[in-house]
Image (spheres, rainbow, N blue to C red):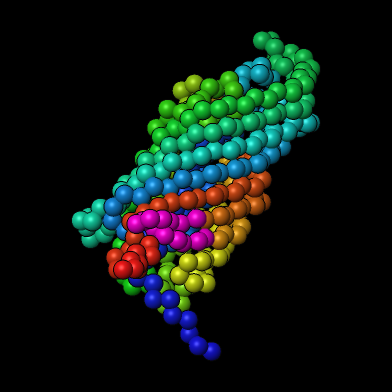
C-alpha cells in the first residue's frame, strides 16, 4: 500500500492549533460540583507550534446538563433557602437542569523571539451569552432547636432563572517547544471575576471568585502520515467566594484529542476529558462536606482548513457526551470554532492570480 505524504510544514496548521485549544466556560451554578475549568479547554494539536503574529478565534458553545438531589441540595444551601439548623435526611426528591448558549472572542498573539528556547504566546478570553437553570423537588429533614429538640421540616421548591450578560476575563500564557514529531507545552491561566454573577441566582455567567490554573501537555504529530495525538494535564486552585464563604477544592483535569488528517484541508478524530476534584470543598459556607466531584466525557470532532483572504482559516466542530459523574451536573456539550491566523511560511497564494487579456 502506498504511503500517504501530506508534506505539512512545521507551522502548516497554526490556525487549527490556535482554534482547537479552547476556553473555560463560566458556571451556571457556582458551588456544588462546578469548577472554573470546564473540560474541553484543550484538544488536538494543543502543543504544536503556532505561526507568529495575531490570531482571532470565535467560539459558539452549547451545553445541556442535569443533576440529582446532592447537587440540587448544595444549590439550595448556597441560595440561602434552607435553615442553618436543618439536618437533611436521605429522602430527597430534587433535580437541577441547566442549558447555556455562550459565545467567546479570543484574540491571541504569538511572539517570534524565542523565550526559554520555546515559542511564547498570550491570549485573552472574553465570554457573552445566556444561561438558564431550573431546580424543582422536595427537600425534607428535621430542624434542631436551641435545646436539642427536633421539628420535622419539608420544603417544595420550583425555581428557575435566566441570565444574559458577559463572563469573567481569562488571560493565558503559553510556551511551546518542538522536536520533530514531538511537541511540548506548558501554560498558566486564571480567572478575573468581573462577569455577571449574583450569589442569590441559580444562573450565572461569572463564577464569583478568582482561580489559578496551570499545567503541561504533549502532542505527537507526524506531518507525513497525518497522525496526531494530544494530551494536556492541569490543576486548578480556586479562591474563596466571599459572597458565599465557599471554596472549591483543588481539581485535576486531563483533556485529550486524537485525529487523522485525511488531506491538507480535512481532519477527523475523537476528543475526551477526565475531570477529578482532588481536594475537599471548604469554608464557613460549606454545608455539604467534602463534596468531591468528577466527570468523564468523549465524542467526535471534525476540522476544515481554508484560505480567508491573505490569512488562514479553520473551522472545527466537536461534541462530548458525559458519564461517570459524581457531585456534578452532567449531560452533553458542543463546540463550534472559527479562527483566522497568519498563513504558514511558503504557503501557496490564497487568491487566484489576475489574468489580463490584451
State the residue in front, 141 or 62. 62
Identify the residue shown where x is 41% and y is 43%.
106
Q: Is residue 305 within the magenta segment?
A: yes
**Residue closer to the observer: 299 or 130:** 130
Q: Where is residue 340 in the image (x, y as percent from the top left)?
A: 40, 52
**Residue found 72% across the figure and 26% down from its top:** 88
View extreme (left): residue: 113
Q: Quadrant of residue 194?
A: top left
Extreme-front residue of the structure? 358
The percent position of residue 160, horizontal first and vertical second, equals 68, 25
Residue 304 percent across, percent down from the top left: 50, 61
Q: Is residue 37 left or right of residue 120?
A: right
* Above or below for 226 versus 96: below
Residue at 39%, 76% in the rendered image = 7
Q: Where is residue 299 in the image (x, y as percent from the top left)?
A: 61, 57
When the figure is inspected, residue 289 is found, relative to residue 110, above or below; the finding is: above
**Residue at position x 60%, y 37% from top?**
100
- Residue 236 in sight from this viewpoint: yes
User: Which span of residues is magenta-colored?
Assistant: 303-315
Which part of the image, by quadrant, shows the C terminus? Answer: bottom left
Q: Is residue 209 above or below residue 272?
A: above
Residue projecting furthest to the bottom:
1
Residue 240 visible to the viewer: no
Whether residue 38 appears in magenta in the rendering, the answer is: no
316 to 261, vertically: above or below: above
Q: Say which quadrant the N terminus sits in.
A: bottom right
Q: Is residue 74 left or right of residue 282?
A: right
Q: In which quarter of the image is residue 204?
A: top right
Numbered label tally: 0
Q: Is the magenta stretch mostly helix, strand or loop?
A: strand
Amino acid at each position: 500500500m502506498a504511503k500517504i505524504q501530506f508534506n505539512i510544514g512545521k507551522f502548516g496548521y497554526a490556525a487549527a492549533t490556535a482554534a482547537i485549544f479552547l476556553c473555560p466556560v463560566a458556571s451556571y451554578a457556582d458551588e456544588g460540583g462546578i469548577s472554573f475549568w470546564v473540560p474541553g479547554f484543550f484538544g488536538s494539536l494543543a502543543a504544536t507550534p503556532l505561526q507568529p503574529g495575531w490570531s482571532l478565534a470565535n467560539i459558539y458553545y452549547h451545553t445541556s446538563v442535569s443533576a440529582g438531589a446532592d447537587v440540587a441540595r448544595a444549590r439550595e444551601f448556597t441560595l440561602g433557602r434552607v435553615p442553618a439548623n436543618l439536618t437533611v435526611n436521605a429522602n430527597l426528591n430534587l433535580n437541577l437542569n441547566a442549558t447555556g448558549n455562550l459565545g467567546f472572542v479570543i484574540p491571541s498573539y504569538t511572539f517570534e523571539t524565542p523565550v526559554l528556547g520555546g515559542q511564547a504566546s498570550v491570549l485573552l478570553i472574553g465570554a457573552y451569552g445566556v444561561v438558564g437553570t431550573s431546580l424543582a423537588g422536595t427537600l425534607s429533614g428535621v430542624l434542631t432547636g436551641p435545646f436539642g429538640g427536633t421539628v420535622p421540616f419539608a420544603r417544595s421548591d420550583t425555581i428557575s432563572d435566566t441570565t444574559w450578560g458577559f463572563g469573567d476575563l481569562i488571560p493565558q500564557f503559553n510556551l511551546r517547544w518542538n522536536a520533530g514529531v514531538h511537541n511540548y507545552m506548558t501554560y498558566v491561566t486564571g480567572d478575573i471575576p468581573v462577569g455577571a454573577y449574583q450569589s442569590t441566582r441559580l444562573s450565572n455567567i461569572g463564577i464569583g471568585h478568582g482561580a489559578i490554573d496551570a499545567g503541561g501537555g504533549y502532542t505527537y504529530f507526524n506531518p507525513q502520515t497525518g497522525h496526531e495525538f494530544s494530551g494536556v494535564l492541569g490543576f486548578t486552585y480556586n479562591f474563596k467566594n466571599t459572597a458565599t464563604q465557599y471554596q472549591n477544592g483543588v481539581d485535576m483535569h486531563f483533556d485529550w484529542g486524537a485525529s487523522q488528517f485525511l488531506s491538507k484541508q480535512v481532519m477527523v478524530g475523537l476528543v475526551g476529558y477526565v475531570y477529578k476534584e482532588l481536594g475537599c470543598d471548604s469554608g464557613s459556607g460549606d454545608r455539604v462536606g467534602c463534596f468531591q466531584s468528577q466527570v468523564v466525557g468523549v465524542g467526535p470532532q471534525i476540522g476544515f482548513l481554508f484560505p480567508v483572504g491573505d490569512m488562514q482559516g479553520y473551522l472545527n466542530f466537536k461534541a462530548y457526551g458525559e458519564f461517570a459523574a459524581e457531585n456534578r451536573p452532567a449531560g452533553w456539550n458542543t463546540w463550534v470554532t472559527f479562527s483566522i491566523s497568519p498563513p504558514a511560511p511558503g504557503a501557496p497564494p490564497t487568491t487566484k492570480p489576475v489574468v489580463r487579456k490584451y
